[in-house]
Image (cartoon, helix red, strand yellow):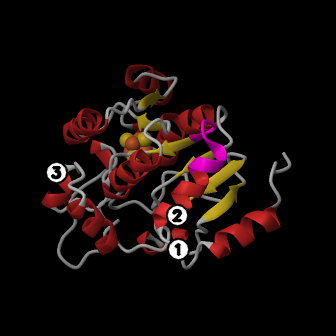
Amino acid sequence: MTPTVSMAGLKALSDSFESRQPQDVLAHAIGTYFPDIVLASSFGAEDVALIDMAHRINPKTPIFYLDTDFLFTETYETRDRLIAKYGIAPIQVKSLLTPERQAEKFGDKLWERRPDECCNQRKVEPLARVLKGYKAWITGIRRDQAPTRANAGLVEWDQKFELVKFNPLARWTSEEVWTYIKLHEVPYNPLHDRNYPSIGCTYCTRPVQPGEDPRAGRWAGQAKTECGLHIK
Ligand code: SF4
């Protein structure tokens, strides 16, 4: 499919944001695309900061989350505290397969045997389905989270899902995200205070040890480092 916006135009726009703040990127994104833009949230640190920022720009900005059926209780509680504080209504997006149906079709503990297929069923397909309804999406990815994210633009054409992708926090460090969260008293997942810098499904997330890479707790012991949501 041909992008509805020029690639050169997006690159120039992205470059123009390199010296600006995330709120500037977000204000442009929401101002240009609302209501056809959606904020993806896993209720991790970056995403709660973005929810606060987006709420200040336009409290009606659509938000969705991928409910894999395997999220931590603390993640649902964080969602509920955000709903209470901001009056938002995050859209719950689920796999077409219940966990039971997945086990019937692929066998037990797919996440141990074929994590890529499990993520495909519970994250990638549902994401593709929800993004079909929008022209742009907003993510919380940062360049220093992983080598796979080091070249993330502030604005890009998402080749995989065929829409514009805004990464307002791409230039920020984790410290900058936490400074924002504390300054604005944004509700956050308490697991972050228990050595979980990156939080996904219960089966595939463990706390990290001092000195370990922040994403070492995701798919520990497997070659996998990404869900497949942000791979070009
Ligand atoms: S993170 Fe693990 S449990 Fe969650 S969808 Fe991916 S493989 Fe499955």
Confirm whether the magenta stretch covers residue 36: yes
Mark nearest the camera among 1 and 3 is 1
Q: What's the distance in space between the residues labelled 1 and 2, CA to CA?
A: 6 Å
Where 143 sits versus 93, above or below?
A: below
Q: Quadrant of residue 73?
A: top left
Q: Quadrant of residue 213?
A: bottom left
Viewport quadrant of the C terminus? bottom right
| Residue 117 visible from this viewpoint | no
Where 90 sits versus 30, above or below?
A: above
Q: Which residue in the protein does label 2 denote?
A: 24
Q: For the view shown, which residue lies furthest in the left direction?
A: 194
Q: Which residue is drawn at 39% across and 29% down?
A: 89
Q: Which residue is drawn at 60% across and 36% down?
A: 35
Which kind of residue does numbered mark 1 sit on?
A: Arg
Q: Which residue in the protein does label 1 denote?
A: 20
Q: What's the distance in space between the residues labelled 1 and 3, CA to CA?
A: 30 Å
In terms of depth relative to the viewer, which is nearer, 68 or 40?
40
Which kind of residue does numbered mark 3 sit on?
A: Pro
SS type, badge 1: loop
